[in-house]
């Protein structure tokens, strides 16, 4: 696996070295302070049903709802050297409910079946149009009751003289997983119960998880109507990679907490190809092959066809096909044997096929929607089915203001 | 392993062939510059990509996050 990665990185660097950038016209740039450029509001509502809850060892309700709201503010300025600086500040808030959380208690009596997640982010890029290069950096934080994550990234990209662009981004996520075990594995007296019935746990403790990623990309204009991209991620994960409240039931009826290796290497490779067909149709194709050190392999293929009813109003039906093999450590409810070294009954690691289809509507009139500052409205709905019987629906809304 | 090598060869060939594509001048890019022709994911797709990464075993190579956040794994 390491040899493959080194070969890929070597090939990539060879390509980067082989191209240079012609100096473009920068006369349109004049120095100006960082000023507000655009705001994006993205909201989604997600609802899911299934019957393979990981908390109950692969059985029971997977009913989940999630309401996600995010705002992104982008500021743009040009410095004295005519480099374009962009600063994007984001804040997201999710509220979810999950029926299976009640079963952290053996009897299904856990009171907490919902939760919040808060995730601010900050990204900065500096584009030097003369050299065709861009550098950037970002900070990210996410906090929810049982999980904290802090991330940072740095990126660099270089345009080529042939309408291409190479990009490299390195990221690190340093996470802490709160060790909330199923009630039967808690030591006696771990919980105290208040007069109002609320359960209090003085100290769960936590365990670390680290994710390091190198993302390589190459985009290329192929002709006047077509452009494509090759995307490759090298992802290395270490630490506690399971979740402490996921049960596993063995063939002898005894249960335990899922146990997974403390290292995982992931290698996804993606290809994107966009084609402008005629004057009113845009086809967006995507394919990804994924493999990892847990023995999971997958193929993803999707196609979107955007129909531009007018230059400013479009309809986009889409379809996504996905198939994966099971991870080496997965087995359904009550089929693991006690002698197994690693075990999980989390159906995200099972073998299955999924289909996702739906459509979107996008409205972006040049004079704005009702107001000149409201530039764009996009609504998208999708229906998702897995051969594990999991079914979900998601509806999303994006509003853009300038 | 042979399958992976074959795949890497295909991707490398694809990347090597792309620079040999037809030259396109700036003034010929009106279609390519259409916002719907973007090679990155749409903003409205952000939460779709999130739920897919939680409900499926694979993630990445789509310009999205590859780690962090959400204890639902």
Image: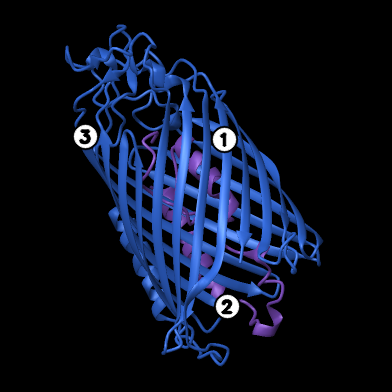
Chain colours: A blue, B purple
User: In screen coordinates, is A316 left or right of A138?
Assistant: right
- How far, Cα to Cα, is label 3 from label 1? 29 Å
The residue under label 1 is A46
The residue under label 3 is A206
Q: Position of residue A137 (x, y in %)?
A: 36, 66
User: In screen coordinates, is A144 left or right of A66?
Assistant: left
- Rendered residue at 47%/20% (across/down): A99
Label 1 neighbour load within 10 Å: few <14, some 14-19, many 20+: many
- How far, Cα to Cα, is label 3 from label 2? 52 Å
- Rendered residue at 51%/18% (across/down): A51
**Residue under disc 2 on the same chain as residue under disc 1:** no
Residue A389: image quadrant is top right
Residue A338: image quadrant is top left
The chain identifier of the residue carrying mark 2 reads: B
Q: Assign a secondary structure to mark 1.
A: strand
Q: Counting residues from the N terminus, which is met first, the one under dot 3 or under dot 1?
A: 1
Q: Position of residue A138 (x, y in %)?
A: 36, 62
* Total count of labels: 3
For residue A309, the mark is none
> In terms of depth relative to the viewer, which is nearer, A338 or A140?
A140
Q: Residue furthest front?
A: A195
The chain identifier of the residue carrying mark 3 reads: A
The residue under label 2 is B20
User: In screen coordinates, is A330 left or right of A317?
Assistant: left
Image height of A130 relative to A10, above or below: below
């Amino acid at each position: 696996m390491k040899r493959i990665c080194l070969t890929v990185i070597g090939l990539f660097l060879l390509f980067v070295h082989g191209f240079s950038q012609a100096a473009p016209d920068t006369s349109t740039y004049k120095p100006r302070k960082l000023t507000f450029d655009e705001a994006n509001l993205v909201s989604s509502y997600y609802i899911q049903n299934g019957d393979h809850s990981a908390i109950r060892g692969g059985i029971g309700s997977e009913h989940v709802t999630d309401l996600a709201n995010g705002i992104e503010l982008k500021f743009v300025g040009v410095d004295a050297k005519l480099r374009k600086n962009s600063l994007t500040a984001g804040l997201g808030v999710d509220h979810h409910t999950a029926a299976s959380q009640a079963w952290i208690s053996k009897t299904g009596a856990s009171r907490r079946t919902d939760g919040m997640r808060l995730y601010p982010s900050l990204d900065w890029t500096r584009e030097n149009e003369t050299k065709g290069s861009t550098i950037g950096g970002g900070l990210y934080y996410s906090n929810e009751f049982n999980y904290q994550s802090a991330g940072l990234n740095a990126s660099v990209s270089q345009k080529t003289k042939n309408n291409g662009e190479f990009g490299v981004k390195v990221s690190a996520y340093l996470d802490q997983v709160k060790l909330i075990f199923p009630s039967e594995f808690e030591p006696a007296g771990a919980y105290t119960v208040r007069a109002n019935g609320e359960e209090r746990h003085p100290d769960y403790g936590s365990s670390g998880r680290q994710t390091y990623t190198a993302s390589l990309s190459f985009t290329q204009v192929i002709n006047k109507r077509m452009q494509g991209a090759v995307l490759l991620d090298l992802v290395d994960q270490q630490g506690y990679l399971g979740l402490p409240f996921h049960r596993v039931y063995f063939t002898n009826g005894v249960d335990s907490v899922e146990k997974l290796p403390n290292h995982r290497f992931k290698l996804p490779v993606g290809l994107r190809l966009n084609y402008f067909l005629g004057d009113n149709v845009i086809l967006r194709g995507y394919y990804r092959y994924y493999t990892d050190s847990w023995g999971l392999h997958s193929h993803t293929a999707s196609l979107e066809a955007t129909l531009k009813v007018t230059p400013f109003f479009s309809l986009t039906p889409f379809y996504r096909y996905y198939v994966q093999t099971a991870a080496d450590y997965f087995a359904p409810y009550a089929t693991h044997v006690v002698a197994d070294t690693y075990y999980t009954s989390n159906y995200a690691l099972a073998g299955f096929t999924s289909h996702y289809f739906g459509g979107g509507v996008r409205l972006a009139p040049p004079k704005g929607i009702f107001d000149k500052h409201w530039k764009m409205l996009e609504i998208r709905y999708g229906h998702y089915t897995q051969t594990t019987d999991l079914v979900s629906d998601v509806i999303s809304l994006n509003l853009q203001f300038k | 392993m042979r399958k992976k090598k074959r795949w890497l060869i295909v991707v490398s060939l694809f990347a090597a062939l792309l620079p040999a594509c037809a030259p396109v001048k700036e003034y010929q890019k009106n279609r390519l510059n259409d916002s719907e022709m973007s090679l990155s994911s749409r903003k409205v797709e952000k939460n779709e990509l999130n739920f897919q990464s939680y409900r499926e075993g694979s993630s990445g190579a789509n310009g999205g996050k590859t780690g962090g956040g959400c204890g639902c794994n």
